[in-house]
Amino acid sequence: MHPALILVSAAALILGPGLWVKRVLEQHNREEEDFPATGGDAARQLLDRHQLQSVKVQCTDIGDHYDPDAKAVRLTRDKFERKTLTALTTAAHEVGHALQHASHYPPFLWHTRLVQVARVTGELGAVILISVPTAALMSRRPVSPVIVGSTVFAMLGAGLAAQLAALPTEVDASFRKALPMLQDGYIHSEQVKDAKSILVACSLTYVAASFASVLSIWPWLGPRLALVWPGNPFCAAGGKRLASVVGRTTLPVQGAQ
Ligand SMILES: [Zn+2]
């Protein structure tokens, strides 16, 4: 396959979900309708309804998410304070994660652990890769490509495993937790179709943000990957071009679970 075709396919795969998520969330976050609560109030009511008074509801600047360490549902200001379909649906989705945590839902626990493993693997891998030029300079010999390759694939593999574990967690939070809660007094039957689109977007947000974050380190990672895969189409110029496109695409919600 032509390298340019691979590059375009990779860009569509990586950018496509993020752009679609952004469009769906914005589309239903514009018009204030006659909804019974703001996103913040709905999150509080739903948590109380499930005896989760200990879980906090907070406003944040860093994207909608549930924080299992702080036991907090966090919503951006445009959802926390407003009565829109996106605000209500996102609040119900994040409350869904709080319910998973409280009930020790296995995929949620696996995902939380895998994120921690990926974080440690990423930090260790970065230290190893940063040390490569120094080690080569001191020993006056090139560092084995096997060491560089194994490190890169361990970093990417741990990240990928965490993303895969996120999928069942996200689908459960959206469709087995959030949707029934929304249908129980928050939305009308004619709003269910739009709410389902938003819930799919909420489920994809984490995966889309993870794809984008891989590309943000590509200018640095690409040349190192060339050591173990010479001539791959994503290295050097192609990778930099792709990463510059990703850099201009700001996802509305990042780091959400
Ligand atoms: Zn989520």
Image (cartoon, rainbow, N blue to C red):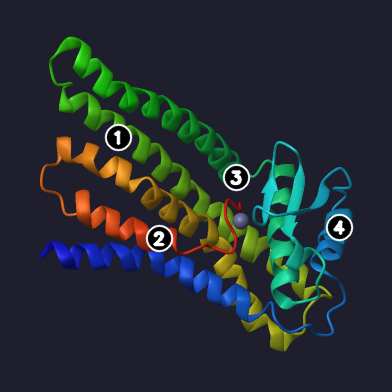
Residue with the mark numbered 4: 44
Q: Position of residue 95 (x, y in %)?
A: 74, 56
Tag nearer the camera, 3 or 2: 2
Residue with the mark numbered 3: 108
Residue type at mark 4?
Arg
Q: Is residue 79 above or below residue 191?
A: above
Q: Position of residue 77 (x, y in %)?
A: 76, 62
Kindly give the residue lying farthest to the bottom in the view shown: 190
Quarter of the picture holding the N terminus: bottom left
Residue with the mark numbered 2: 246
- Along the polypeptide, which appears first: circle 3 or circle 2? 3
Residue type at mark 3?
Phe
Q: Is residue 23 above or below residue 227?
A: below
Tag nearer the camera, 3 or 1: 1
Q: State the separation of the CA atoms marked 3 and 1.
A: 26 Å
Labelled disc at residue 82: none
- Along the polypeptide, which appears first: circle 2 or circle 1? 1
Q: Quick one: 163 or 7, which is closer to the camera?
A: 7
Tell me if residue 162 can be seen.
yes
- Along the polypeptide, which appears first: circle 1 or circle 4? 4
Tag nearer the camera, 4 or 3: 4
Q: Quadrant of ligand 1?
A: bottom right
Residue with the mark numbered 1: 152
